[in-house]
Image (cartoon, rainbow, N blue to C red):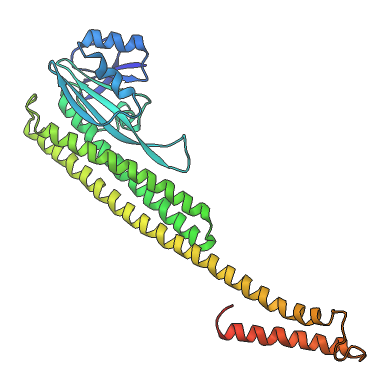
Amino acid sequence: MILIRKTMYDTLVTLDHLEPDSWINLVNPSEEEVQRVALLQGVPLDFLVDPLDADERARLEVEDGVILLVLRVPVENTADPRVPYTTMPIGVIITSTAVITVCRAQHDLVSEILNGRARQVDTSRRLRFAITLMQRSALAYLRCLKDINRRSDTIEQALQESMRNQELIDLLGIEKSLVYFTTSLKANDIIMDKVLRLRAVQLSEEEVDLLEDAITENRQAIGMANIYSDILSGTMDAFASIISNNMNMVMKFLAGFTIILMVPNIITGIYGMNIELPMQDWPHAFAVLSVLALGGVAVTWWWFARKRWL
């Protein structure tokens, strides 16, 4: 799908044809659409194709005056509900006449700009447009990290009450999301720093300030992701130890209870032998044996309780 927008009188207007200073938004484009945009804008074909790869890494590339920025941005993981978030690539291509965004699926970052929720977006200021995407990407990571922290607290509370393995599996899924975030944020940080030092373009003072703000927010997200990951790892280790200890306590109780139940079996087993035994002809032998069995159980229970084996 191709969508062309252009800023006119501080408003994004949809166009049915390409004009200078336009924004071309490609969402899961067909091969024909990719080739047409590449031909019209003089963009290397791989610049348009690479961001469509789900595993494409964040990078910065300049070729024949065309700049390619690939950012990894957060997205909800619909493929595996156990892992709440993952990341996807978005390509931002800057030419002499247009800015092009390429992604496999429409992302909230792009939707916010399309819906006018992003302020001060001017398609004629192409580099500033790219920097705005960088800043909003960092803010999106911060929002997702806060949601991850909230989910983690909810699961930890449930784990304290249930002590099941399912909660640990849920925490493991959250930890995977944090690993994806940390890796992508660090890669984005390198790209932002390269843009700041890029000689192929001349950044205005306003653009430098905006990019530095984006770098600051991105590094804040890196710090938050690292902290949450460390806390989560420690929490998982602690709860895994607690679950293991609880299992040991249960096994200890069952072993002690089994030993206690063996006492009456031993007594009755002896008197079940086909040999001469004391009191075998006494009419009250059963009552005496029952008292002895119960007494043995009581004494054994008291001894185990005193030793804290139960």
Q: Is residue 166 left or right of residue 181?
A: right
**Residue lying at 20% horizontally and 17% vertically, measured from the top left:** 98
Question: Which quadrant would residue 26 be assigned to in this image?
Answer: top left
Foreground residue, 170 or 128? 170
Numbered-mark total:
0
The image shows residue 14 at horizontal and vertical percentages of 30, 17
- Can you see residue 5? no
Q: Position of residue 15 (x, y in %)?
A: 29, 13
> On the rendered image, what quadrant is the N terminus found in?
top left
Quarter of the picture containing the C terminus is bottom right
Q: Quadrant of residue 291?
A: bottom right
Q: Tell me if 306 is positioned left or right of 214 in this view.
A: right
- Between 46 and 109, the one lying in front of the other is 46
Q: Position of residue 269 (x, y in %)?
A: 80, 78
| Nearer-the-camera pick, 278 or 238 | 278
Q: Is residue 83 above or below residue 97?
A: below
Residue at image location 26% in from the left, 14% down from the top? 45
x%, y% of residue 301? 65, 83
Q: Taking 10 as reference, is 286 left or right? A: right
From where the camera sits, is residue 51 visible? yes
What residue is rendered at 31% in x and 42% in y? 181
Q: Is residue 99 above or below residue 55?
A: above
Image position of 180 with respect to 90: above or below: below
- Name the residue: 24% across, 28% down: 70
Residue at the farthest front position: 275
